[in-house]
Image (spheres, coloured by chain):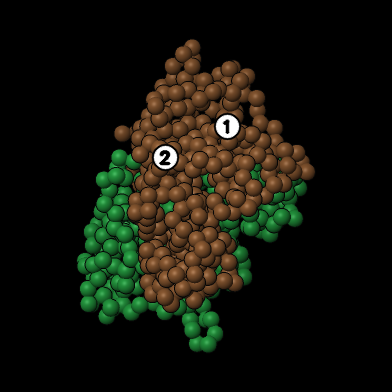
Chain colours: A brown, B green
Amino acid sequence: MNEPILEVSDLKVSFRTYAGEVQAVRGVSFQLNKGEVLAIVGESGCGKSVTAQTIMRLIPTPPSVIKGGSIRFNNKEITRLTDKEMEKVRGSEMGMIFQDPMTSLNPTMSVGRQITEGLIKHQGMGRRAASSRAVEMLKLVGISNPEGRMNQYPHELSGGMRQRVMIAIALACNPKLLIADEPTTALDVTIQAQIIELMKKLSEQMDSSIIIITHDLGVVADMAQRVIVMYAGKVVEQGTVDELYYDPRHPYTWGLLRSVPRLDSSREEELVPIPGTPPDLFAPPAGCAFADRCAYAMEACFAADPEPTRLTRTHSAACWLLHPDAPKVERPVLTGGAAR
Amino acid sequence: MSEQPILQVSGLKKHFRLGRGSTLKAVDGLSFAVRRGETFGLVGESGCGKSTAGRTIIRLYEATEGEVLFDGENVHRLKGSKLQSFRRKMQMVFQDPYASLNPRMTVGNIIAEGIDIHGLYTGKQRRERVHELLRAVGLNEEHAGRFPHEFSGGQRQRIGIARALAIEPQFIIADEPISALDVSVQAQVVNLFKKLQREHGLTYLFIAHDLAMVRHISDRIGVMYLGKLVEVTASEALYAKPLHPYTQSLLSAIPIPDPALERTRERIILEGEIPSPLNPPSGCPFRTRCPKAMPECAAAMPELKEAGPEHYVACHLY
């Protein structure tokens, strides 16, 4: 199972704006194995969506520029493909689910046409075959009366239904990779539970790999096998869910875990917010980007950016505290899994 | 419970006429009381009427039926100077920190608007009060001269809170005050709410859909579904022993940031979605999705009754 389908190495993406260059992604490396669910977490503006959209080459150039690094997907170098070649990959091998099902479906096209569009274009299916496949997909994502829904328009559906339609579109061509960017953030919790369950079931059935981008650490614990924590355009820690929740090593990961209340924790526990705000990516700091907000920051942290330290085969973190000469610090009590 | 509650809502209804004879019953018979100094959380999914309830209580909307007693006075009957003095006692913090601050006013003038309307302070005193408020919410004095667009979401929410505090209210209705913020910033704002409550003895009505956060901040919680309260109890009891099938499924739907626990947790997944409030089901509104629905659920809406000490539930099972 440990066959990588996607390998991102040292990816750097910038945006050219009138105010200067925003370095949104500053050297991100990770790999995704076949059939695996990987979560990317971090605050808004940390570069998680830009990373995902760059993998699908969805951000127009200009303003975005891939400054360096490589994205190898299914034996293809994504960064070097022409737009035409990329279009093929996008329709048949990758699928994407966006956060906002209200704005990411075409309001002027029926649900049926939006699902069959990709099938006809990328799989060379006839109209009739595509249409029956679309009905099958709608049934698969749990939409009742799929034949009737085919002729409806997005505004006739609820938020949860639209998200199901989006999943149907993304999965219609049996993609090897599904990228879900905050797929449940706009949904109510009972609908979120339905959609998560659906995504888990479908990825097992179709053997697709999933990258899920979210800020909800509960959703991560529920869905993912591995997690990447991003901060200011870099990966600060990555590992299996168990490593991240029970043995987190980066102070930013500690901060994330301590700032959310758990449904099953004591109410007396204080939430510990991370003070301050993320740095300006027009001029990222020379040292560790988190140093300014970090309670454990040392002189070295402001001087140089730490490289990731390998802790286990799957777990690494980029923090000077992991340097052999660094003082030993006691990890704070976490409201997350490590609290127990 | 000898002391009179600060807020007593009884049989509150808010219906919107939509024309062509259809009526949207956004809030349909809400009754609960909030005690002085406590935080009462109102939770439910989108469209359940929790925001409308908040807005009707503070009289941004006129009630269709029922009454809201604040300090023993019927809010919807107040006029003139009495209404003005009520407005001083109850304030609101809104969900969207981007839309609820006037972009053309400086932060200082936004915060002082209530002070000016109620004629509390002028000149130097007014300025000092604004600075004091800015410090109280974790901003600083220089921010008074800036405009809302210069601030981040979390900072804007602090400005909204400072504005609500400016006229020294006793009661604050916070309508999804943290939903638009990043997780690490949510904790900052929640801690601020808690600190201000300790310092000023405030009473909160905290409206939100994030049950984990509501449980963290509230003393008691009311759960709403389709315009009705289905369960009201202390927040510890609501988590430890939820009685209503809707509360049970709501709690089980929330993922907990603990992978080992998540692997073994049984989840009640509800079928379908919330029915349209334009055409709600007969009897109990939850019966169409309820795993435990019985024939009698279609016949009559169960009353909210005491099923345990201080634990109220509206369900035919109890």
Q: Is residue A232 above or below residue B6?
A: above
B46 lies above or below B19: above
Where, quadrant-wise, is the N terminus of chain B in this rendering? bottom left
- Separation of residues labelled 1 and 2 (CA atoms): 18 Å
Q: Residue at x 48, y 22 (%)?
A: A309
**Where's the C terminus of chain B, which quadrant?**
bottom left
Q: Residue A33 shows which numbered tag?
A: 2
Q: Callout 2: few (<14), some (14-19), or many (20+) C-alpha neighbours within 10 Å?
A: some
Disc ID at residue A10: 1
Residue B307 against residue A155 in the figure, above or below = above
Task: Check residue B239 in the rendering and tell me which mark sits there, or answer none.
Answer: none
Residue A82 pos. (x, y %) = 64, 47
Work out whether mark 1 precedes mark 2 in sequence or the reverse, and give the earlier one: 1
Amino acid type at circle 1 is Asp
Q: Secondary structure at mark 2?
A: strand
Residue at image point 25% right, 71% down = B293
In the rendered structure, the residue with mark 2 lies on which chain?
A
Seen in the picture, residue A131 relative to B268 is either above or below; the reply is: below
Report the chain holding disc 1. A
Q: Residue at x 68, y 41 (%)?
A: A65
Judge from the rendering whether residue B291 lies leftward or rightward of residue B19; answer left or right. Answer: left
